[in-house]
Amino acid sequence: MKPSLPDTLCTRCGLCCDGSLFADVELAGRAEATRLEVVGLEIEDDEANGALLLQPCRALQGKRCGIYAHRPQCCRTFECHLLQDVRRGTVGVERAEEQIAEARKRIERVRNLMAHLGQHDGHLPLSESCAEALARDPHPVPQVNRKRTELEAAMSTVEELLRKTFLGGGRRSHAHRAAG
């Protein structure tokens, strides 16, 4: 039996769950939020947006969901722009895999640059973690400031790549709030 597209692509990606694409995910209601809290996920109650599943999702194990059968409704229905393009036949599976690998490589570079600047908090969405690293006062050592400049440029490139490839040029799902 041939694996499904989500089995082929999503299990190599995980960007919708690891804090790279989204800062949080809107939940269907209090019952869904409670069910997720029971399994140990971090939920924030937001007056304006209702209950939110914070990203990166703690149920993510590598690039797979550890609570797949019990994941929130918005996670069940979300398909990134790249997956939609593959379904439509406008992008081949091999090309999609290459785009995922390129995005993950660029994100890893951003994470490495943040680590050089002392930002090691893996519990924040990528854009928030980057913003914290860049918010620190300029360093007296020029090499450190060059790393800051590299980080700004690398993050800008990553955000553009994620927007174009995975979010469809800026359109956002109503159930997810972009991390940037």
Image: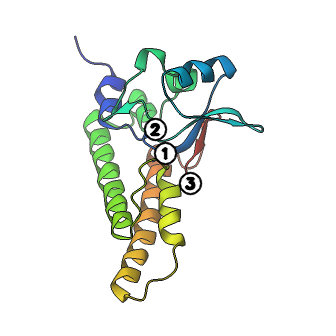
Sequence-first tag of 2 and 3: 2
Q: Residues within 10 Å of mark 2 (few under 14, many from 20)?
A: many
**Real-space Cα distance between discs 1 and 2?**
5 Å
Q: Amino acid at mark 2?
A: Cys
Residue 21, numbered circle: 1
Q: Are marks 2 and 3 in contact (CB under 8 Å)?
A: no
Q: Amino acid at mark 3?
A: Gly
Sequence-first tag of 1 and 3: 1
Q: Are marks 1 and 2 in contact (CB under 8 Å)?
A: yes
Q: Residue 69, how many percent across, how many down?
A: 43, 14
Q: Amino acid at mark 1?
A: Leu
**Real-space Cα distance between discs 2 and 3?**
13 Å
Q: Residue furthest top?
A: 1
The residue lying at 44 percent from left, 63 percent from top is 155
Q: Is residue 109 above or below residue 172?
A: below
> Which residue matches tag 3?
180
The residue lying at 35 percent from left, 64 percent from top is 115
Q: Quadrant of the N terminus?
A: top left
SS for tag 3?
loop
Q: Is residue 12 left or right of residue 154?
A: left
